[in-house]
Image (tube, helix red, strand yellow):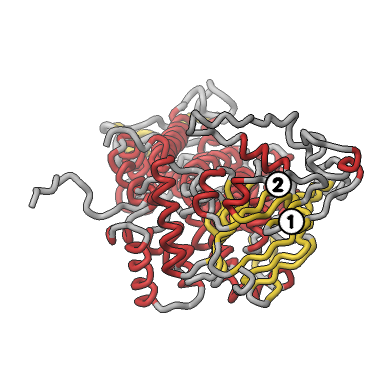
Amino acid sequence: MSNSKVILSINSLSKNYELGSAFSRGKDVVHAVEDINLEIVEGETLGIVGESGCGKSTLGRMIVRLEEPTTGEIIFEGEDLAKLSNKNLRSVRKRLQMIFQDPYASLNPRRQIGKIVEEPLRIHGVGKQEREKIAKDLLRRVGLDLEAYEKYPHEFSGGQRQRIVIARALALNPRLVVADEPVSALDVSIQAQVLNLFKDLQKEFNLTYIFIAHDLGVVRHVSDRIAVMYLGKLVELAPADDLYDAPAHPYTKALLSANPRMNSDDTSERIILKGDIPNPINRPSGCVFNPRCPKVQEICKSESPALIQIGNRKVACHFPEN
Amino acid sequence: MALKDSSEAIFSESPGKIALRILRKDKRSIISLSILGVIVFLSFMAPVFSHFIADTNPFESTLNATINVHGVETAVLQPSTTGLGLGVTPIGPTWNIRSYFLGADGQGRDVMARLLYGGRSTLIIGTTAGLLCIFFSLLIGIVAGYRRGWIDAVLSRILDIIWAFPVYLLAISLSVVLLTSGLTIGFIHLGPGSFALPILIIGVVYIPYVARPIRAQVLALREREFVRAAVGSGAKHSTIIFREILPNVMPSVIVFIPIIVSLSMLTESALSFLSIGVQPPAASWGTIINDGLALLYTRPIVGLAPGLMIVFTAAALNLYGDAVRDALDPKTRARGD
């Protein structure tokens, strides 16, 4: 992977939300995302997993600048998105698209499918006939009938809607697609179809994906590398198979063991974590995982572990497994 | 080739068209639109009626006139010793469409002609005020909900201030002040007798009731994923507002129209009843009720007729509003059709 071109690199990216009304601003700060460093290589799929509220969606939204980063850099094809003005951002947005979780909320109920898919093209000044040609081609490519062009969103199922959302995201021929839980709202039988569509399109359009999910099975199926987040921090980053075969961070290990098993012969011990995710306003000192970690030591309570390279993976733990 | 079921829709229908189709079949909308149609038609025929049919000037007192009722020459105003203080009893309904169909009021004017003219004022003022209110509410609601931040804070506080007063108290106070002085906005001067004054006053007092729900809806829509997708594609603010947000706010705006128009008409009638709306000699249903107040015991029809007109119009508007709401609400769309 070292000889591949880095398409996106994220440097010390953080996002804080200040809570409170106009009169008490600045008292409580939620650290939604803290000091994330990541590099994404052209053509790969990076999976981001973590429990609800770990900041994975916020990270995804910052990458497409639907959320303003508090600090840090997002270098996409040589440009720092975090510093771009809204005007200069427009040209970048062509190459950077997002797919959302809820296919029911992702389509404007009052517009025809054709118009929805054409909208990004219209925004970027593509002529009418050209738009129609591209939109119809995309609809066919994502597996919908041409009749869909004149229909309205309410006439489609969740899986079909997500196909429309994918067609819209691909209309501008983007380089990088951030997919925020794109199949979580779909039936399991439909999930596989949509995931395979993602894979096919990746080959065909040479796409790079950031694939955010909480379903570990889904992520393993599509990802080349996987990043595990906990309380706004990146705790482990590893090639997908390595991560699943031998998780190095205790949190990753617990997360994997919580995955329902199909194989009844698999008797490996299930790790049950104590307590809940701590409140992101008053986060634990030291390692953020320390109150729930089965192998916690004194140093974990005082010192935050850095993300260090071990072999082909990166781990933020004082006492990594293996 | 299999035969296609002819009832199957070949062309897709937009949500708006579906609503219209449901509405067209709804008995409530048929009934209420018929009632409204008759009332509106008659009211706007008022000049024709008074000039060609009844041959009466509804804005002039005719204290000494006599008319022929069933061959008997009768005074329009008869001296009276009983009843309340006027000293005269106007003639009752003749049920003759050519003259004093519903009788005369205390100044000998044809009640039927005034009722139609009054309907015209009330309908014009109510509709214009209602639409004015909806327009400004939409503007304020979208700007506040879309821009958020301090613009929203300022606009919301202004709405709160208007909302803090009871509607009628505010309308009455504004009317009392503005009717004596008139109102000058830039080059435009609205004289004390102008219809524009009640329109403006009624339009303003109802703005918070419409603007706040619209603002809330825009705030919610702004977070919807299809709006984010448009932002993520680099859409301009105007594109997002007009293509993504406005079409999704319109159903609630449409539901508001009949309700607010009916409220505006009721308010207009109330203000006119209190002599601070439409100014005499012009008539509105409110002023006619006021005229009828003194004749309540001798000629109740004078107050009753405009009262019934208000009830029918308001009820029809609300019934229509209900039908529109049901047609636009996707949750009730499953009803067998």
Instruction: Judge left or right: residue B247 versus residue A57.
Output: left
Residue at 8% of width from left, 52% of height from top?
A: B1
Q: Are the residues flagged by discs 2 and 1 in contact, CB closer than 8 Å? A: yes
**Residue located beneath label 2 in the image:** A248
**Residue located beneath label 1 in the image:** A310
Instruction: Judge left or right: residue A154 versus residue A236.
Output: left
B81 to B98, vertically: above or below: above
Q: Nearer the viewer, residue B198 or A99?
A: A99
Q: Nearer the viewer, residue A304 or A97?
A: A304
Q: Nearer the viewer, residue A262 or A166?
A: A262
**What chain does mark 1 sit on?**
A
B55 to B320, vertically: above or below: below
Viewport quadrant of the N terminus of chain A: bottom right
Distance in Å between CA atoms under marks 2 and 1:
9 Å
x and y percentages locating residue A299 in the rendered image: 90, 42
Viewport quadrant of the C terminus of chain A: top right
Amino acid on which disc 1 is placed:
Ile
Instruction: Judge left or right: residue B51 versus residue A56.
Output: left
x and y percentages locating residue A215 in the rendered image: 55, 43
Q: Tell me if mark 1 has few (under 14), some (14-19) or many (20+) residues whose alpha carbon lies within 10 angstroms of its own.
A: few
Residue at 39% of width from left, 42% of height from top?
A: A189
| Local SS, label 2 | loop
Residue at 54% of width from left, 49% of height from top?
A: A220
Q: Earlier in the sequence, mark 2 or mark 1?
A: 2
Q: Nearer the viewer, residue B140 or A142?
A: A142
A67 to A187, vertically: above or below: below
The reply to whether residue B196 is in sight is no
Instruction: Judge left or right: residue A293 versus residue B320.
Output: right
| Local SS, label 1 | strand
x and y percentages locating residue A241 in the rendered image: 57, 51
The reply to whether residue A274 is in sight is yes
